């Protein structure tokens, strides 16, 4: 029993890992996940719009991109992108693999998020597009102002799920050989584990992953439940409030003009 | 518009279909449809389901592109060219209302006014409120569509189409999805719209409406216009066996 605690929960080694985890490990994991999700959303939106286009060629582009990047193991894509683009992008990245890590994660995230958006768009009743077109609005405006804002609500649970996935995938960027302060939760845990010859630092890193992902998992269930059961008129809860704000944002330019 | 001034023969019709054909794959659903709607006229299209009446309507604003034939608006061939411009001139009301559920009642009307007619927000809101007033729903301007009854939704959809100031209004089974007690309100709104001089093409199962409101009734079956005439001619003196059979079934 003592051995068990010593291997996984040794206070000394936990204490040794904690400062670096709090100083940069946790921060790097969150930063990598958030930025690549944000870029992935942009890529995904583009892929989804191409994917439901009437133009066969545009659909094909979206299809091939999605199939390839979803079909490859993330670690292979990260390594391939990181190594192949290191020298051509040296001018932009300054030889810093951190940016390449974000790029690779974003490209992968885009493929998954694109599929989520595409399914969301296809789930919107086609009467919505028809009514919008029948009023004289263009295909693009109908997509942007009528279909996509509605799809955005539907896809929120899947999108949060995808974010959880991305948080975990950030652990793979260690393969690009980041500098100490650029290292993510997993790598910090691993480094300390190797130094101390004890698994406790990895356990601590794991605990921090769970601190991020478990609440999000429950948030998904909560949003999902709300979307399925409909919203009560009185109480407005945060997730939906956020959605409403983002739906308004899509109209911002139209309002401003 | 100045519909009574028009004298030229090729502009006799507000809307005209000439030799219209439509196929879905190998299935020919419309076979040589010829139909003219005069300015201010209300034409009801009746017929059994699958007769092609909704498809005719959807070809008029090119939600379906015809496989052959011509669609004319005031004598102008609009079968090709800018489809959005055509649709500004032809309003449509759907069976399932198709209000935008993420927009308030008011914004459902404001959105296309801003986008298509490029109106300022203030002007669009004023016009939208006026139109809502005409369908008796001004107080519900800030409501979400989900909180409205079916009849109210359809009245908003009518107001939304009217706000675009179309030359012709198309109604695609506008009351078929309504609870029976809500049908009357929507039909009487459509009747008063017809009376006000709007040019209307109405696909309907409501024979009472066709008889009382239509200037002309068109009976379609199996992709053809089988008979057309005044409501009296169609309902009291049907000439063809097919129309008699149909009327026996629905009346």
Image: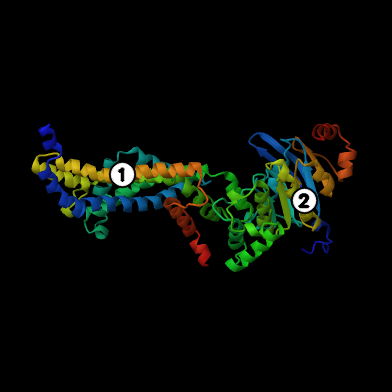
**Total number of numbered discs in the rendering:** 2
- Mark 1 — on which chain does it sit? A
The x, y position of residue B197, in whole percent, is: 80, 58
**Are both tags, 1 and 2, on one chain?**
no
Residue at image coords 64%, 61%: B128
Q: Residue at x 51, y 42 (%)?
A: A123
Of residue B118 and residue A17, the one placed in the foreground of this image is A17
Look at the numbered discs 1 and 2 and tell me whether their residues touch, using CB distance below 8 Å: no
Residue A85 position, x and y percent, is 27, 51
Q: Secondary structure at mark 1?
A: helix
Instruction: Give the position of the N terminus of chain B as an image quadrant.
Output: bottom right
Residue labelled with disc 2: B188
Q: Which residue is mark 1?
A: A213
Q: Quadrant of residue B221?
A: top right
| Residue A79 visible in the picture | no
SS category of the residue bearing label 2: helix
In the image shown, does B86 or B26 lie closer to the viewer? B86
Circle 1 crowding by C-alpha within 10 Å: few under 14, some 14–19, many from 20: some
B13 or A116, nearer to the observer: A116
Res. B117 in view: yes
């Amino acid at each position: 029993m003592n051995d068990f605690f010593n291997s996984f929960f040794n206070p000394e080694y936990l204490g040794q890992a904690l400062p670096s985890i709090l100083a940069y490990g946790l921060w790097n994991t969150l930063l990598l996940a958030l930025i690549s999700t944000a870029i992935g959303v942009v890529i995904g939106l583009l892929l989804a719009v191409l994917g439901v286009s009437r133009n066969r060629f545009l659909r094909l582009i979206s299809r091939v991109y999605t199939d390839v990047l979803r079909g490859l193991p993330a670690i292979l894509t990260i390594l391939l992108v990181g190594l192949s683009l290191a020298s051509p992008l040296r001018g932009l990245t300054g030889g810093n693999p951190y940016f390449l890590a974000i790029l690779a994660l974003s490209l992968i995230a885009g493929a998954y998020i694109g599929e989520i958006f595409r399914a969301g768009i296809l789930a919107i009743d086609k009467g919505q597009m028809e009514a919008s077109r029948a009023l004289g609005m263009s295909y693009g405006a109908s997509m942007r102002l009528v279909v996509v804002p509605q799809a955005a609500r539907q896809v929120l649970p899947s999108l949060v799920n995808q974010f959880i996935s991305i948080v975990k995938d950030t652990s793979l960027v260690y393969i690009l050989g980041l500098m100490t302060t650029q290292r993510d939760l997993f790598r910090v845990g691993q480094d300390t584990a190797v130094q101390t010859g004890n698994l406790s630092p990895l356990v601590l890193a794991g605990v921090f992953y769970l601190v991020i992902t478990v609440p999000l998992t429950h948030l998904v269930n909560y949003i999902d439940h709300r979307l399925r059961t409909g919203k009560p008129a009185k109480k407005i809860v945060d997730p939906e409030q956020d959605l409403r704000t983002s739906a308004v944002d899509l109209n911002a330019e139209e309002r401003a003009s | 518009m100045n519909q009574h001034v028009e004298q030229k023969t090729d502009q006799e019709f507000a809307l005209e279909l000439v030799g219209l054909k439509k196929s879905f794959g190998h299935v020919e659903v419309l076979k040589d449809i010829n139909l003219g709607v005069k300015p201010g006229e209300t034409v009801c299209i009746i017929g059994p389901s699958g007769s092609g009446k909704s498809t005719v309507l959807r070809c008029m604003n090119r939600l379906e592109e015809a496989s052959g034939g011509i669609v004319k608006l005031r004598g102008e061939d609009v079968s090709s060219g800018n489809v959005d411009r055509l649709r500004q001139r032809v309003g449509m009301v759907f069976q399932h209302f198709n209000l935008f559920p993420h927009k308030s009642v008011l914004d459902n009307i404001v959105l296309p006014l801003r986008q298509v007619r490029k109106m300022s927000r203030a002007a669009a809101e004023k016009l939208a409120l006026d139109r809502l007033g005409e369908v008796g729903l001004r107080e519900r301007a800030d409501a979400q569509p989900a909180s409205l009854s079916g009849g109210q939704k359809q009245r908003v959809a009518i107001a939304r189409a009217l706000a675009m100031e179309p030359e012709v209004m198309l109604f695609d089974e506008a009351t078929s999805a309504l609870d029976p007690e809500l049908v009357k309100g929507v039909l009487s709104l459509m009747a008063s719209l017809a009376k006000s001089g709007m040019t209307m093409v109405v696909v309907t199962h409501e024979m009472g409406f066709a008889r009382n409101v239509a200037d002309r009734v068109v009976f379609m079956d199996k992709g053809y216009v089988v008979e057309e005439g005044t409501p009296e001619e169609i309902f009291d003196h049907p000439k063809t066996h097919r129309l008699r059979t149909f009327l026996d079934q629905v009346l």
